[in-house]
Amino acid sequence: MGDPKGFMTTPRQEWPRRPVEERVRDWNEVYVPGALLPIISKQADRCMDCGIPFCHEACPLGNLIPEWNDLVSREDWRAAADRLHATNNFPEFTGRLCPAPCEAGCVLAINQPAVTIKNVECAIADRAWEEGFAPPRPPERLSGKTVAVIGSGPAGLAAAQQLTRVGHTVAVYERDDRPGGLMRYGIPEFKMEKHHLERRLEQMVAEGTKFRTSTAVGRDVGAAELKSRYDAVVIATGARAWRELPVPGRELTGVHQAMEYLPLSNRVRQGDLETSPLSAAGRHVVIIGGGDTGADCLGTAVREGAASVTQLDIYALPGAQRDEDTDPWPTYPVRLYRLSAAHEEAGDLRTAPVADADARLFAASTLRLDGDRQGHVRSLHLVEVDARRRPVDGTGRTLPADLVLLALGFTGPDRADGLVDQLGLDMDPRGTIARDPGFATNVPGVFAAGDAGRGQSLIVWAIAEGRAVAAAVDHHLTGSSRLPAPIGPYDRPMAV
Ligand SMILES: Cc1cc2nc3c(=O)[nH]c(=O)nc-3n(C[C@H](O)[C@H](O)[C@H](O)COP(=O)(O)OP(=O)(O)OC[C@H]3O[C@@H](n4cnc5c(N)ncnc54)[C@H](O)[C@@H]3O)c2cc1C
Ligand code: SF4
């Protein structure tokens, strides 16, 4: 701890965002470039180096937060980068994209704003790249064992990097044309610019990981054949089976799933398309679903130049403070009013014709969608609901809508490629791939990690799963492993 009284003398200060008017005219990250480094050492000084650091417990990776806060407050960036990379393969991803359950568990957060842990993590990661503290780390010798990792999202990438670094020969199979999973074609550029992903992929290639893109296992290569060619297989195919909206009018044109809409916009940014065929430009957009995927649609539609954008949330407007009965410290408060960058933009620009807060209507349930004679959606009818989702009389409302985006979450792995059936994998009652405590499926030599096994989750959990499954696979191949396993497959976020 550089300054034992830092938490008393220094107020919390976050990485400032660029002005709304400026940032909605481009797709770059929302933060002011270069504005984090000058403030971050003082912010790290706010860490109290607690005897029992709950932040550390709240982070699925077990990031050694007080240790690197201390190193940053002393400006020892090399040591900070080493400590951070000891537990996290991809801190520049989590430093930008993680909802930071660590900050909800920060001891300072009991009665003060938490330490800006996520910002400190990002600063260390960025500095490590700038200073060359994150070189490729190829193995000293090869084990002679081979592993196929199916899926190149954060879980597959973390598993592949860990296994490559201990000497196994790893090939990552990806059905998309580029690796990255949801970080490539789901998450928009304004949350994380893709060059961060490219840089890590280059590092992985230099270490020896091989990538086989545009190859859907189950469709382009048989799953059983693949299994016979490798000593072990890790399935990290994500949870892409989306929830549907069973209301009249769902079949109209102009009604799309979020994961049909967001990848096209990301492809425009990657230079694959001139414009998105589903662009929101000039259209009245309604997003159904109050989560992060909906917020990503919101920020994208605003940048595409929508005529109006409204986001509907079935839950009531949450409070600005954590509810100490349902979500006491140090748990992560699920129901809390949070103003993401996209909500801030939509609120400032008044994109919604009517809204309870920023661009959102809360306790809003969609009754039906109406279309024109050509079968194109034109309006959305909704009603307010109570806590038990019963309609409240007299609250019916109609919104103009010629692009409706469904962001209702995901139920489990997408089974269309046939991978699950070809291998004869057992599924658990939630619809995800069943695993034993060692991440092994019912098929010998086949393991499952990330959203495919856990269900829809977060990048930090996916990286933790990738690290843990790598330890399990290494043990399976060699009889022992020194790789860390930060979580088990049944671990869940801290809760009361
Ligand atoms: C729009 C959106 C925004 C999100 N934003 C955030 C955020 O800001 N912060 C956060 O922490 N989390 C966020 N999440 C959640 C997070 O992205 C996921 O939890 C995480 O990516 C899961 O990682 P994964 O590796 O398990 O799967 P994925 O990232 O889904 O990757 C799975 C990969 O497997 C490939 N694949 C599937 N089947 C096959 C096959 N048969 N053969 C070959 N390849 C296959 C897919 O193409 C994909 O590339 C978001 C999710 C969505 C949908
Ligand atoms: S990965 Fe997420 S939870 Fe862990 S330290 Fe970083 S921001 Fe916090």
Image (cartoon, grey):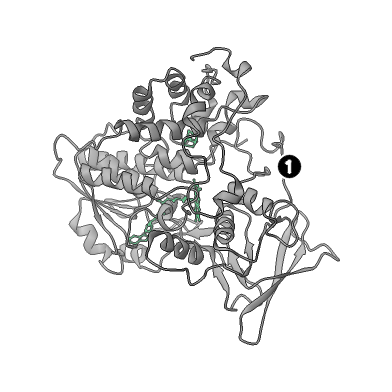
In percent of width and height, residue 262 lies at 49, 61
Between 307 and 56, the one nearer to me in the picture = 307
Q: Residue at x 43, y 24 (%)?
A: 68
- Mark 1 lies on a secondary structure that is loop
Residue 251 position by quadrant: bottom right
Compared to 178, does 339 lie above or below?
A: above
Compared to 437, does 234 lie above or below?
A: below
Residue 304 position by quadrant: bottom right
Placement of the C terminus among the 4 image quadrants? top right
State the residue lying farthest toward the top: 4
Q: How many marks?
A: 1
Can residue 37 be seen? Answer: yes
State the residue lying farthest toward the right: 394
- Left or right of residue 92, residue 400 in this image: right
**Residue type of the residue flagged with mark 1:** Gly
Can residue 433 be seen? Answer: no
Between 99 and 372, the one nearer to me in the picture = 372
- Residue assigned mark 1: 319
Q: CB of residue at label 1: within 8 Å of ligand 1?
A: no
Q: Residue at x 69, y 74 (%)?
A: 379
Residue 128 position by quadrant: top left
- Structural crowding at the residue carrying mark 1, measured as other residues with C-alpha within 10 Å and reported as few (<14), some (14–19) or many (≥20): few
In percent of width and height, residue 337 lies at 68, 44
- Left or right of residue 460, residue 363 in this image: right
In percent of width and height, residue 230 lies at 20, 54
